[in-house]
Amino acid sequence: MYYHGKSIKQDYLQAIQWFKKAANQGHIMAQNNLALIYTRGEGIQQDYQQAFKWLQKAAEQGHAPAQYNLALMYYHGKSIKQDYLQAIQWFEKAANQGGAFAQYNLGVIYANGEGIQQDYYQAMKWFQKACENGIQMACDNYRVLETAQ
């Protein structure tokens, strides 16, 4: 309520306080939301290390959006050393739960051979799944790879 300002005045500091209470009790949505607040610097100073900490907690509990966001941090090297293998691991966990953007990113990683051997078969597999989940760029990339075969 405080975060979105629904029915009450928006108050990021109050939202952060409540998210922290729930996050410290293991609530994965609160952990993920807290991580996003730290990533964006909403109401507080941007802090990628805190974002990483909370994303990791939620991701390890199987929360697909947190797994995807953690993968992005590894992929881009935000506050941590860039690590494509860790990014792939977390993208796969999110992708296997139906995360379309994670599926798309895996297609890109396999198509470009980022941190792993280039594998067009795997790229096509992930692009196809992302396409089936509504990502148009994945459909386009799938077609490009299919015609190149």
Image (tube, grey):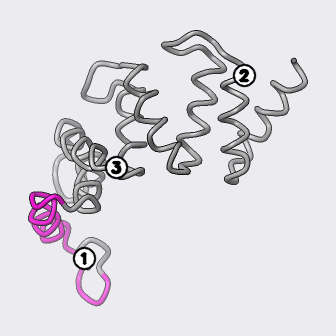
Earlier-in-chain disc, 2 versus 1: 1
Q: Secondary structure at mark 1?
A: loop
- The answer to whether 89 appears left or right of 16 in the picture is right
Question: 126 or 78, which is in the foreground?
Answer: 126
Give the spatial CA distance, label 2 vs label 3. 27 Å
Provide the residue span drawn in magenta.
6-26
Q: Is residue 13 above or below residue 117?
A: below
Q: Position of residue 110 (x, y in %)?
A: 61, 21
Question: 43 or 60, which is in the foreground?
Answer: 60
Give the spatial CA distance, label 2 vs label 1. 48 Å
Give the quarter of the figure containing the C terminus.
top right
Count of numbered circles in the view:
3
Q: Is residue 12 magenta?
A: yes
Q: Is residue 23 magenta?
A: yes
Which residue is tagged 1?
Answer: 10
Which residue is tagged 3?
Answer: 62
Question: 7 or 129, which is in the foreground?
Answer: 129
Quadrant in which residue 83 is drawn:
top left
Question: 8 or 17, which is in the foreground?
Answer: 17
- The answer to whether 125 appears left or right of 11 in the picture is right
Packing grade of label 2 (10 A; few <14, some 14-19, many >=20) is some
Q: Residue at x 29, y 90 (%)?
A: 7
Q: Nearer the viewer, mark 1 or mark 3?
A: 3
Q: Residue at x 87, y 18 (%)?
A: 148
Q: Residue furthest top?
A: 117
Which residue is tagged 2?
Answer: 121
